[in-house]
Amino acid sequence: MKYLGHEIIGKDMDNGKFVVINPNITCGKCYSCLNGYENLCSKEKAIGTNVNSGFQGWLQVPSTNLEYIEKPDLKYIFTDPLAVVLHGMSMIKISSNYKVIVLGNGSIAIVWRLNLLGIKPDVMCRSGIWNNKELTISNLYKLTEKVSPNYYDIAFECIGFKQSETIKKSLGMIRPKGEFICFGVFPEDYSPTLKVRRLFEKEITILGVRSFTKKDFKYAKNILDLHGSKLISRLCISVVSGENINAIMNDIENRNIDKVIVRMRR
C-alpha cells in the first residue's frame, strides 16, 4: 500500500525544527539534474506517487528536500502548488496589461500569483462557480461557454486528463503570437485531436509545465513567508484529524472547501 499526501509540513527529528518538504526526490547525476532542471530528472521519485508520503505519519527524505520554517503555519501547504506556478511563469514573459484566462478548477495559486502581478484574469471552469471572492477575476465562464476568438495573450490550462475540447478551444481564444501553458497532467497514452494549422497561422507557443525545481520551491517558500497569510485568509480551508476518514472524504467532496488539510499525530 502506498501512503498519499505530498504537500507536507512536518518536523525535522534531527534538530526539532519545522520544515516544508519538497516531494520530488531527484538523482542529482543525470543530464537534467546536472544542467539545472532537475524537475526533468530521468530517475525522479515523487513522494505520494511512488514513495510513501504524509499519511504515513513519518518520512525519510534527503536534507536537500527540506525548507525550514519558523512554525507549522498552514500557509506553507501551498509551497508545492505555488512552486509549480512559479516554474510555469518563469518560462514566459507576462505583463500587467496582458489578457489572461485560466482554465480549470485547479486555478487558485495561479490567480493569486496573477493578482500579485496586477492581473485580473478570466476564469473558465466546469461548474462556472468561483467561491474565492477575495481573489480578483474579471469574468467567469463555464467550460461549455463560448468566448471571443483571438482575444487572450496567454491561456493557462489546469485541467489535464481527456480535455481535448479545452485545448482546441484555447487555441481559438489565443491571439497571434500568444502562449498556451499546460499545467494539467495528461495520461501517457492520451493523444488529443488538434487543428495544428492554427499554430502555423498564429505562431502560437505551447508550453508544458512539469513540476518545479528546488530553486522554484525555495522561491515559493520565500513568497509565502511574506504574503502567505493573505492567501490563507482568502480561502475556505478545513483541517481534519487523520483518524477521521469520514470527515476527510466529506470535505474533499464539498465544493465550498478549497483545501483539506489532514493533521497527523504520532
Image (spheres, grey):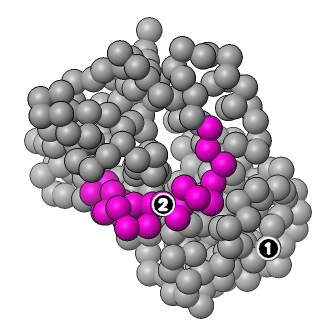
Residue 40 rendering spot, x and y as whole percentages: 30, 47
- The structure residue drawn at horizontal position 58% and vertical position 28%, both measured from the top left corner, is 240
Q: CA distance from mark 2 to mark 1?
A: 25 Å
Q: Secondary structure at mark 2?
A: helix
Q: Is residue 125 above or below residue 60?
A: below
Q: Is residue 55 above or below residue 78?
A: above
Q: Which span of residues is magenta-colored?
A: 216-238
For this rendering, which residue is in front, 179 or 61?
Answer: 61
**Which quadrant: the C terminus?**
top left
Q: Main secondary structure of the magenta part?
A: helix
Residue 253 rendering spot, x and y as whole percentages: 74, 31
Residue 77 rendering spot, x and y as whole percentages: 44, 45
The residue singled out by tag 1 in the image is 139
Residue 238 seen in the figure: yes
The residue singled out by tag 2 in the image is 229
In the rendered structure, the answer to whether residue 153 lies left or right of residue 130 reads: left
**Which quadrant: the N terminus?**
top left
Residue 151 lies in the magenta-colored region: no
| The disc label shown at residue 240, or none | none
Amino acid type shown at disc 2: Ser
Q: Secondary structure at mark 1?
A: loop
Q: Quadrant of residue 241?
A: top right
Q: Crowding near pointer 1: few (<14 within 10 Å), some, many (20+)? A: few
N-terminal-most mark, 2 or 1: 1
- The structure residue drawn at horizontal position 54% and vertical position 14%, both measured from the top left corner, is 243
